[in-house]
Image: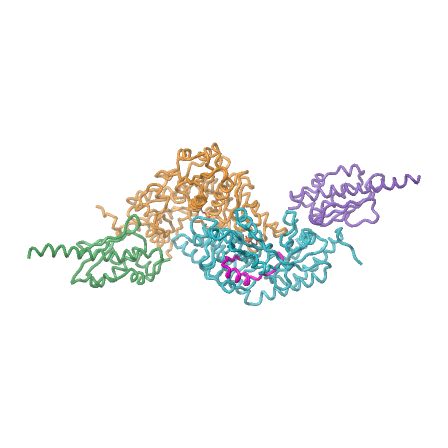
Chain colours: A cyan, B orange, C green, D purple
Amino acid sequence: MTERQVYMDHSATTAVDRGVLEAMLPFFSEEYGNPNSLHAWGRRARKAVNEAREKVAALIGADASEVIFTGGGSEADNLAIKGSTSMRKDKGRHVITTAIEHHAVMDAFGWLDKQGFDVTVLPVDDKALVSVTELEKAIRPDTILFSMMFANNEVGTIQPVAEAAKICRDRGILFHVDGVQAAGHVPFNVQDLGVDMLTMSAHKMYGPKGVGGLYLRKGVRVEPIVHGGGQERGLRSGTENTAGIVGFGAAAELAVRRLADGSIDEEARLRDLLIKRVTSSIEEAFLTGHPTQRLPFLASFCIGSLEGESMLLRLDAAGIGASSGSACTSGSLEPSHVLLAMGLAHEVAHGSLRFSLGKDTTEEDIVYVAENLERIVADLRALSPLWKTRG
Amino acid sequence: MTERQVYMDHSATTAVDRGVLEAMLPFFSEEYGNPNSLHAWGRRARKAVNEAREKVAALIGADASEVIFTGGGSEADNLAIKGSTSMRKDKGRHVITTAIEHHAVMDAFGWLDKQGFDVTVLPVDDKALVSVTELEKAIRPDTILFSMMFANNEVGTIQPVAEAAKICRDRGILFHVDGVQAAGHVPFNVQDLGVDMLTMSAHKMYGPKGVGGLYLRKGVRVEPIVHGGGQERGLRSGTENTAGIVGFGAAAELAVRRLADGSIDEEARLRDLLIKRVTSSIEEAFLTGHPTQRLPFLASFCIGSLEGESMLLRLDAAGIGASSGSACTSGSLEPSHVLLAMGLAHEVAHGSLRFSLGKDTTEEDIVYVAENLERIVADLRALSPLWKTRG
Amino acid sequence: MYTEKVMELFMNPKNAGRMEDPDGVGEVGNPRCGDIMKIYIKVKDDRIADISFETFGCASAIASSSMVTEMVKGLTLDEALAISNKDVVNALGGLPPQKVHCSLLAEEGIQAAIEDYRAKQKAKSGAAAPKS
Amino acid sequence: MYTEKVMELFMNPKNAGRMEDPDGVGEVGNPRCGDIMKIYIKVKDDRIADISFETFGCASAIASSSMVTEMVKGLTLDEALAISNKDVVNALGGLPPQKVHCSLLAEEGIQAAIEDYRAKQKAKSGAAAPKS
Ligand SMILES: Cc1ncc(COP(=O)(O)O)c(C=O)c1O
Ligand SMILES: Cc1ncc(COP(=O)(O)O)c(C=O)c1O
């Protein structure tokens, strides 16, 4: 290991905050009751789950009764998409999503397609923005659901959620938002936005992995995908992951604080520093996604004539954790569908790099990353047959 | 709170073992990487997940590649039942289960029924035993799945799993076993048993809640219920609950030790002590379930002329955590379907009590529980219009 | 889940136990459903002079029994009949939704006991009338 | 995921960089797929006297390039042609399944460079023949 370790992959997952872990700890070996048990152990666990639900609801401006806990963000996405269409399939069989969704949404729509639903996929522009005009055009009398992410996990672009919500409301279409990357990082209120369903995941906001949340506006009905004991209002059966849920609650509380105290602005300042430095000091390096309408912690680039995995592993050797939409990082042959949907050529998309900052990222970290990236890009370009040495 | 606290509801959930928690701890705030990330953080997390998979597989005699992690036992049950039938529905639409399954299995079959499958529910005898002769009779040419629990969670009866497996194998029927209560407590080997799928849940064996496991014999195909990033061989997408999975692995290791070192026999001895004391010192109290072919840690009774919840809450006031299949504990009007399936009258079933022992249960705990139960039964019977004062 | 008041009365119910020679007895509920409430009353000057109950059922059934017996003790029969299950729930500081039916038993139990008393009185006076 | 050998060669590749005046050059792969390998050789007495590579691609592509250039250096052209991607994978101590195609590029790159060399020789001797 190198001396310095700089984790800049907070879009992939975050460390559980120490305070969050403190809150969780009693619920493993001391307050281990099953919230469904009648006795004191069970009642204390139930109380803890209820309190966590209040906290998560508070983060997004929902009522606690509107939040369902699941076993992660992907599960919440699947529940929202499969569960709501299953309830409404008699009203119509047309559903809409976008070209840049996370696989959890994309593949849930793939499943709908196999079930006989008609799926329209909205394109995006070169900044990964979805156009609400396109949405309006796509809507048909038999459209029952639109699902769009709040903010993209690869390039950070924030979508016009409120505008889309208004259109869906006017047309009587259910609107699901994958808020996994946005929740806890971008201030919003589900009431003001007017969305029907919104997915969250604790591990993207300094909570534990394996716990998700689904906001379901009062009155929105979904068929469960996990049937059984009737937990979570019958919408997600199974003994509650008490410690995980408590951690999610504590993480939501932390997020509320961070959204209020200027932490997010500082994160955005550091992000901009990194963007400026990389795009100015490295030739043929450009920012991907929207220049301003983007996640405060996410800086994503394409680096010309280079391939993502090789950069990642060289960065890794320097103690830096980052990510790429390169095909080689996923084992598939195609680079990220997001970058391709934005119109990037395959060879350009292969050179993508994502740095996602976290609450403990410092300016020194930014400098360290930039310096190392500059060196690594130079080294790898010396190996690249695509790089024309200049000057 | 009373001085003494005696938790005897280990069938509902167990405390995370201290050693298990130790193993989990680094994976929250230190080794927090996403196992799907390429960098060092991710690789260390991947390694931890792989090691845990080996350990869980070892507990049941499977190959690591045959174990899928899920967000709990209920989800694993749903995945096995819905996922396997979805893959085989062209071969037939008849499925079989039993009358005493956990709701996660029962309600998954209810869902199959709504999807147009034909569901046969096998009866049980007064000891909650399923008859393999009944199974043979129920099988039709279009039968594709049989699902039966290994051991019942309310009355502890252990089913003839190997015999049922042989029948299913001979008839080309997929066999799923809900092993949630048995795994880690009853020694078995999936190879010898010859089952196709087997569900486990970490929190029933001193691991964390919210983590389940599904054994899928090599070659058995299931359609996922959570689609997305392709984790768990594409069968359960979503960022892995690394800490939880590591905890499951450590719990499986602990279970292997306990199955070997005589702990289970000691548990059974204490269970028998409780059974003997309760049935001999309390009038009209009888054991439910099979007298010998039963979970080593579970003692279940019906107490005449009394209702379960009232006993539970009086026990709770004495610091004792127990459980009941009474309707009043669940908020439904019908007492437990398990007790009714065994042929118990409603009024008798209302008086059910379950004590499930754990690894830290002592003989003093048993005596404490018995003494308190005797007192409570006498007190409540003085209030009961059903109890005819004798002598 | 339960209020303190419910737990207090469940743990230490008032007016519990069989009564010798009651003037009226009401039994409501059904063992199939898991609760039976039996109310015994002694009546003096059209008032409930003494009352006791036996209840097979959950904590809220027992607490409701105890509460309702306390509430009606000393009331005239008509006043007692006016006590509703809502009054019982309120006096208990509330009951969980799925337990409200237990308070209904309390209301019905008192009614049944008073009816029984009145029926017996009628029978008595009816039996007495021809004599006079 | 990668063996130590792969990581070692990826971090410190041998024979990396463009070659001036090579006798043969082979380029294989496709930028669409995320990897291109360019192999330069100098040939003396039908043996590979010098060799270098340029590779756009992932760690296994770079490591495979480095490995294959080391393996064929000093071999006769026919011996070099006999080196298969399996040999490269083995020498690397293995590659993850989805990365094995990178080793194929290494095999093909050498072949392409030798073909290029031989084609040029043929052209030269063809061009020279009339002169003599
Ligand atoms: C027999 C049985 N199956 C399934 C389950 C469900 O497991 P989980 O609570 O982990 O979802 C349980 C316990 O709740 C059980 O006892
Ligand atoms: C936009 C988005 N949606 C959904 C998910 C899935 O969440 P989880 O990993 O908790 O299943 C992720 C992250 O993995 C994500 O970034």
C116 relative position to D65: left or right: left
Q: Depth check: B95 or A11 in front?
A: B95
A108 relative position to B356: left or right: right
Viewer can see residue A379? yes
Viewer can see residue D58? no
Residue range in magenta is: A154-176
Residue C83 is situated, as x and y percent measured from the top left of the image, at: 26, 62
Q: Depth check: C127 or B61 in front?
A: C127
**Which residue appears farthest toward the right when viewing the image?**
D132
Residue B264 is inside the magenta segment: no
Residue A156 is inside the magenta segment: yes
B153 relative position to A331: left or right: left
Q: How many numbered discs, if any? A: 0
Residue at 42%, 33% (x, y): give it.
B136
**Which residue appears farthest toward the left when viewing the image?**
C132
Residue A94 is situated, as x and y percent measured from the top left of the image, at: 53, 52
Quadrant of the drawing holding the C terminus of chain D = top right
**Which residue appears farthest toward the front when viewing the image?**
A141
Residue at 11%, 57% (x, y): give it.
C125
Please determine whether, in this image, residue B312 is positioned above or below residue B87: below
**Which residue appears farthest toward the top when viewing the image?**
B170
Ligand 2 falls in which quarter?
A: bottom right
Residue D1 is situated, as x and y percent measured from the top left of the image, at: 64, 46
Residue at 53%, 61% (x, y): give it.
A167
Q: Depth check: B140 or A139 in front?
A: A139
Residue D65 is situated, as x and y percent measured from the top left of the image, at: 74, 45
Q: Quadrant of residue B299?
A: top left
